[in-house]
Amino acid sequence: MNLVDLSWRNMKRNFRLYTIYFISMFVGAVIYFTFAGLMFNENVVEAIQNKENYKTVIFIASIIVFLFIVFFILYANSFFMKQRKKEFGMYLLYGMKERQVAAMVFYETVFLSVISVTSGILIGGLLSKFFGAVLMNLMHYHDDISFAFPLEAILSTILLFALLIGIITVQSYFNVRRVQLVELFHAKEKLDKPLKFSLLLALMSIILIAGSYYMITIGDKAIWKDYFKETLIIVTLALIVGTYLFFRQFSGWILQKLSQSKQYHYGNKMLWISSLRFSIRGNTINFTFNSLISAIVIFAVGFIAVDYAIKADVVKKEFPNHFAFSSPDDKSLAQIEQIMNDSHPIVSHETITGIKTEKIPARKAFYSHPEYYTEEFYLFPESQLNAVVDLREVGEKVDVEGNEAIVLSRGIDEPIEYKRPQPEMTVLKDQTFRVVEKIRYPLLSIPTSPGGDTSMQPSVLVISNEAFEDLKENRPLYTYEIYQIENPKTSNEVSREIYDIVKKIEGSYYSAYVDQYSLNTESSSLVLFSVAFFGVIALFALGSVIYFKQLREATEEREHYAILRKIGVGDKEIKRVIQKQLLFVFLPPLILGLVHSWYLLYYTVILVIKDLPSLTAIIFSVMGLYVLTYIIFYLSSTSIYYKIISEKNTR
């Protein structure tokens, strides 16, 4: 019998063990090809407006997915190898060489890789259509995504698994070589001795976690503003150490107290409590890691989901003009209006005229971040601002008199109603205005381009009609056209055509809502999609780590459960023991991770963004999906655990 035949027989003989390993490789192939398929899907790429941005984000995301697949499959292989140490020991005892054992593993890996890659590409191709449709829906595009199996995605998936085959073979060779023959026959881990748990350290864990939560709740206090980095480091370390001690000491102390109670010997408490006490040491790192990563994943997905939900509203407020540009000649303006009406009929139109001042460097008194605004101010009469308010049907009209003026700002500047003495601004030589108020209302929003580039927002000062009439004599006037159209979200092509016409005039102004809506929507959709995808991957990885560890423990506990059966413990009772034991393994890390993430989201998002009705629903939806996935892992683990500990009795 040659090594290829032996490898094939091994796979048929240990079907369950190989199935678990195959599923890991299969899931890895599906995840990678799904993402690679999106990266190279022509329908998706064609629909995206900002292609360079899309390619950059997807490229970075694909690297992260690639690293995850490598890590996850190597972890699965490590579990797989540990389960087969005794088998390898027999091969070495019969005279096989270490390199022959490694070669056998190589053939097995090739068999599994071929099957998993082939099936993974087929399933991944189907899923890439679904996820492509999800991405288009997030971006509010209506393009159809067809089933696609891009050659680039197929080749990159094959190359990934070719690399993995090589790494796994080397890893397997060193694993076999590093362990002595005697150890291979005693591959089962030595039982951990139960730790002695300290009440002081148990209380310390609660104090550290509670202290971290308290510091998060006072995020608006001076300590965060004055010592942000230092406070962040301290809170992070306290949360990590507190979580570690919670599982190492507090949970162990609870189990210790339960073992000392009078009811300990009643029912099945002794069986599952004693098993957990022995495994605390080995599970602490996993529990801590799971809780912290769960908190990070839920926080990241929740935060990005909220950012995505409010992004469109922010763009609408910051870019209220569907189109605004410097007035061209009459012929060009007629051409522009024809372009709009052909696909997006004009709803309303207003022409405004202003006066441009000299540069005014000292603007700190009027803007919190003057670097975002032009040094020159544009003066407009109150009547024109009020006309634009009517045009947009958003905002409040203003009323200024004499030398009063109102500064218009953007979202980063808080509105202010100045009290006396009011700041003064000197413009146009000796003309001084008294600034009575700063309002957040961009008359002329940030200049844009269809490619996504922006420049400084025009600084605007609204003055009285009388003052404007006095100032405009013998001064150059700057005229702008403001249009509102139907369905501005789909006017990308219109924006490109108008931009090309307007920008023929040097120094002209142009701003379009769709330019930033397209960029922001695509960017936030890509980030949300990628982070949610990574969240699913991370959740699967965390669940798998617990899953594999429980399978290993189940294999090692077969003899103990066989003894329990011999002394009269029935199958129904054993199932209850397993359910309670694994509930303790899955539930505490999940609950602590949810609580961590809730505090982070509540005090950094929910309390900050109060005008989004669906905010809490978004966050609870993310948490609900996370909990549902953990429940699936828990039910699957209990089922497989019971089958493993029952195997020896059925042979």
Image: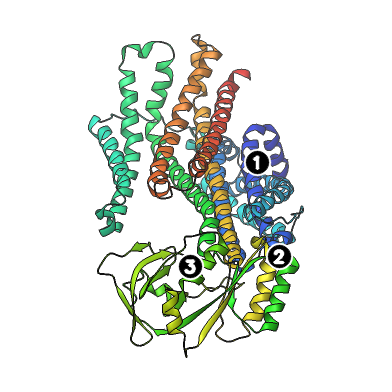
**Crowdedness near tag 1: few (<14), some (14–19) or many (≥20) residues, C-alpha within 10 Å:** many
Q: Is residue 438 above or below residue 558?
A: below
Residue in the foreground of this view, choosing between 240 and 320: 320
- The quadrant in which residue 295 appears is top left
Q: Are marks 2 and 1 in contact (CB under 8 Å)?
A: no
**Alpha carbon separation for disc pair 2 and 1:** 57 Å
**Alpha carbon separation for disc pair 1 and 3:** 58 Å
Q: Residue furthest left?
A: 200
Q: Which residue is mark 1?
A: 22
Amino acid beneath label 2: Pro
Residue in the foreground of this view, choosing between 310 and 11: 310
Amino acid beneath label 1: Phe
Residue in the foreground of this view, choosing between 184 and 355: 355
Q: In this rendering, would 151 be left or right of 263?
A: right
Callout 2: SS: loop
**Crowdedness near tag 3: few (<14), some (14–19) or many (≥20) residues, C-alpha within 10 Å:** many
Callout 3: SS: loop
Residue at image x 55%, y 59%? 393
Answer with mark 2 or mark 1, whichever residue precedes in sequence: 1
Q: Which residue is mark 3?
A: 442
Residue 170 appears in the rendering: no
